[in-house]
Image (spheres, rainbow, N blue to C red):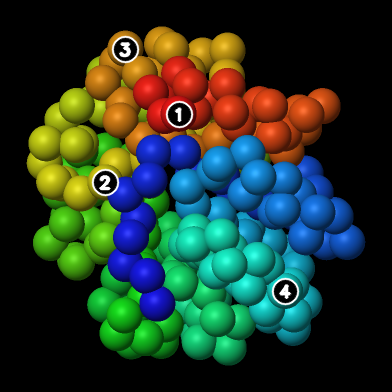
Amino acid sequence: MSKNCEGRLYGILDLGYVTADQAEKMTTLMLEGGIDLVQLRAKGVAEAEVAALGSKLAPLCRVAGIPFILNDYPHLVPVTGADGVHVGQDDISVDEARKLAGPFAIVGKSTHTPAQAAAAKEEGADYIGFGPLFSTPTKPEYIPVGLEDIRQAQELSGLPVFCIGGIKLENLPTVLEAGAQNVVIVSGILTAQDPVAYIKECRSLLGQS
């Protein structure tokens, strides 16, 4: 399994926006556009369905040389052939997740403050998500953290920090000006009329060819 989680543009295939039967097509488009990491987020979906879908998406990402991450379900990482797992701040620890996912699995952790970013490093996370920067319909219960703490979170964690939450093509320049180096984009990609072109435009702003 790859430990490479240092790409700049992280795409989340959220089944709140894309139906399961569209997932393979959307993943193919994301890969064609040049996404650096792909995560499957399937909240409220039966575990067996997550396992079945993950087993279809993992090979697509493997052929493209792109890490495929499961949101939650660390025990499904070896089952699906995924490269790793992402856990929330209130989920199991990084160490527990790695025990279930496998010793070579990528383990990412959600953080909302610089202190949590520093703690994630001590836990042994391979990367962190930091946010939500802006309000987002994906997680309406979360209060936006804003842009002020991005640099501090990066300094304290010393890890790849993927800023997340309400980031789209339109506000990406503002996020980058605030010091963000890596970003997660969800609805912007999944609802774009042309996801491939959308991702390529985002990559251009990120300084990627």
Q: Earlier in the sequence, mark 2 or mark 1?
A: 2
Whole-percent x, y for residue 167 in the image: 52, 26
The residue sitting at 66% across, 26% down in the picture is: 198
Q: Distance between the residues labelled 4 and 3?
A: 37 Å
- Asked if the residues shown at circle 3 and circle 2 are in contact, with their CB atoms under 8 angstroms apart, the answer is no
Q: Quadrant of residue 182?
A: top left
- Compared to residue 71, the image places residue 166 above or below, namely above
Closest to the observer, 11 or 154:
11
Q: Earlier in the sequence, mark 1 or mark 4?
A: 4
Question: Label 4 amino acid?
Answer: Lys
Point out the residue furthest to the right here: 21
Secondary structure beneath dot 4 equals helix
Give the residue pinned by disc 3. Answer: 177
Q: How far apart are marks 1 and 3 (CA)?
A: 19 Å
Give the residue pinned by disc 1. Answer: 209
Question: Label 1 amino acid?
Answer: Ser
- Asked if the residues shown at circle 2 and circle 4 are in contact, with their CB atoms under 8 angstroms apart, the answer is no
Quarter of the image for the C terminus: give it: top left
Q: Which of marks 2 and 4 is nearer the N terminus?
A: 4
Give the residue pinned by disc 2. Answer: 160
